Every structure is written in C-alpha cells, then in structure tokens.
Image: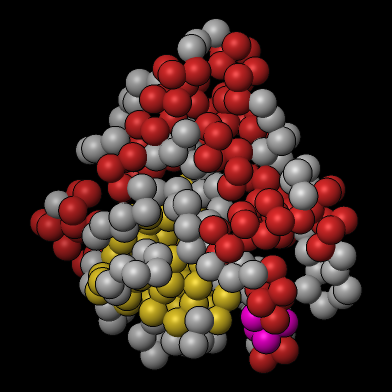
C-alpha cells in the first residue's frame, strides 16, 4: 500500500496529528482497529468500504467516506480489493471545530462525510481530489477545505489543556485533580469533554492508559502480563484483562497471537502498528 502523510500548517496542527493519502490493496479484507485517543475523517475516492462499530451491530457501507469521533471500542473496517482515500487523524478534540453537532452524538456511531458537510459540498471536494496531480496536491486541497470550515468552538481551550495533562501522564491522573487545576467543577469539565471529545475525561484517561500500555508491548518477544499490568498502574491483572477485552474484544493472549500473525504475514507493512486482522 502507498501511504503519504504530513502535518498541516497552523492553526490546524493544534487540532490534527496528520493528513494522509492511502492507496492500494489492504493486507486483509477486514481489519479491526482498537480505540486510540484520536479521531478520524476519511474522504473515500475508491469503491465503498464497510464499518462495523462493535459486536452485535450491523455492518454499514460508506461510499463518500466517514467521520469517526474518538471511539471507545474496536471498529471493524472492511476494505474493497483496492482502496483509495485521503483522510485526517485528529487529536481527540480536533473534530469539534468542523462538526455541526456535539461530538457525543457521534460517539461510537460513524457517520458519512455527507451527513456532516452536506452532499453537494462533499461531491465537489471528491471531484477536486480525484483530478488532483498527486498525493501532495490532494493533501493541500484537503487542508484548504479544513481551513475554510474551521470555526470557533466554546470550551476548546479548556478541553485541550486538560487533555494535554491526561496525555502527558499516560492516563494515570486523578480526574478530580484535573477539575481543580482547571478551576471548574467536575460536572462542567465532563460536559465540555462530552461536547468536544465525545467522552468524559475519565474515559479519555482510560483509553490513554490502555493505548500507552499496548503500544509498549513487543509482540515478537516474551511478555509478563502481570508486570505489564502493574507497570501501567492497573490494580491487578484481572482489571487489565477486563480493559483489554472491553477495548479490543480480545483477551491479551489472543491479541498477541493476532499481532504476531500480522508481523509474520506482512513484515514491515505501513499499517503494522495498530490494526489487527479480522478475517
């Protein structure tokens, strides 16, 4: 697969980790994406893809693309034989400045880009992207569209500062201390987070802690799950295992088996960091 990315210019860089272009055949027809402290926008330029937002939920098809605010559970993406798209990896608070609704309304409920920006605007954007000279020009067009749609968001500064503290601590923070440091009530802080991020500070901290722990695992080497759970600040290994199943749908040992399968079958692949084979 071909993957090209870059960080956008200010002020977008305060909301977005990177803009990217993706083209080619997926290593697997279906990939599972466990939750991370980030959000996603995809403008699709190829055949439709499919998303299942959790077990027990029907798979939905997305032709124009999708918007996913920060997830709290694993999503399954089903790819066509050849995929082509441009997209945005947002910081947790990033999508709020481009959405017409509170982020909480989209929590674990992916929507099409048309539902957010409207069919005529998205059709025009897709046409311009499809006729661009190459990936860098496509990313420039996407960046310009985002700059045009950027709007002021009440409470963004508060959420951004508090999220930074949570991130710096790897999620190991006392939520009560956060509201005191911010000079607001815990209820007010939670409400702002739900409006802008889609989840409460406590949930965001859990996802940060889980992600930091799992990214620290070397799937190719031996793993002491008890030491890993203790080092991440979990009360016990059972608590760690509960979070693992809640976020990925897998036990820790099954997760490692699937990660090792990806490493074995597609060494050095551009997607080999977080997606898991689901087929």
Residue 65 spot, x, y in % from top left: 29, 65
> What is the quadrant of residue 172 in the picture?
top right
Determine whether, in the image, residue 216 is placed left or right of residue 206.
right
Residue 121 appears anywhere in the view: no
Is residue 111 among the parts visible in the rendering?
yes
Magenta region, main secondary structure: helix
Give the quadrant of residue 61.
bottom left
Where does the image place residue 76, in percent across and percent down from the top left? 43, 72
Which residue is at a point 51% across and 49% down the rendered structure image? 38
Does the segment drawn in magenta span residue 262? Answer: yes
Expressed as whole percent of the image width and height from the top left, the position of residue 177 reads 65, 18
Q: Which residues are magenta?
A: 258-263
Q: Residue furthest top?
A: 183
Question: Which of the colour schemes (rainbow, by chain, secondary structure, one colour) is used?
Answer: secondary structure
Residue drawn 71% across the image and 40% down it: 170
On screen, residue 183 versus residue 64, left or right, reads: right
């Amino acid at each position: 697969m071909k993957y090209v990315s870059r960080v956008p210019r200010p002020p977008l860089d305060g909301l977005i980790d990177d803009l990217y272009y993706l083209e080619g055949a997926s290593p697997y027809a279906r990939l599972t994406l466990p939750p991370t402290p980030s959000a996603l926008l995809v403008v699709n330029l190829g055949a439709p893809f499919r998303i299942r937002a959790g077990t027990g939920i029907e798979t939905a098809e997305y032709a124009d693309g999708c918007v996913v605010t920060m997830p709290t559970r694993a999503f399954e993406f089903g790819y066509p034989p050849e995929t082509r798209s441009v997209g945005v990896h947002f910081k947790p608070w990033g999508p709020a400045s481009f959405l017409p609704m509170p982020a909480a309304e989209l929590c674990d409920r992916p929507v099409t880009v048309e539902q957010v920006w409207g069919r005529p605007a998205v059709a025009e954007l897709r046409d311009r992207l499809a006729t661009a000279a190459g990936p860098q020009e496509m990313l420039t067009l996407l960046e310009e569209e985002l700059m045009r749609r950027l709007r002021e968001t009440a409470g963004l500064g508060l959420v951004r500062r508090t999220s930074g503290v949570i991130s710096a601590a790897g999620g190991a923070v006392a939520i009560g201390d956060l509201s005191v440091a911010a000079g607001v009530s815990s209820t007010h802080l939670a409400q702002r987070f739900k409006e802008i991020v889609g989840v409460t500070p406590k949930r965001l901290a859990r996802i940060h802690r889980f992600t930091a722990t799992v990214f620290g695992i070397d799937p190719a080497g031996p793993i002491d799950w008890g030491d890993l759970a203790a080092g991440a600040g979990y009360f016990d290994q059972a608590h760690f295992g509960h979070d693992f199943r809640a976020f990925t749908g897998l036990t820790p040992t099954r997760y490692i088996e699937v990660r090792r399968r990806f490493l074995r079958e597609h060494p050095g692949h551009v997607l080999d960091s977080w997606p898991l084979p689901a087929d």
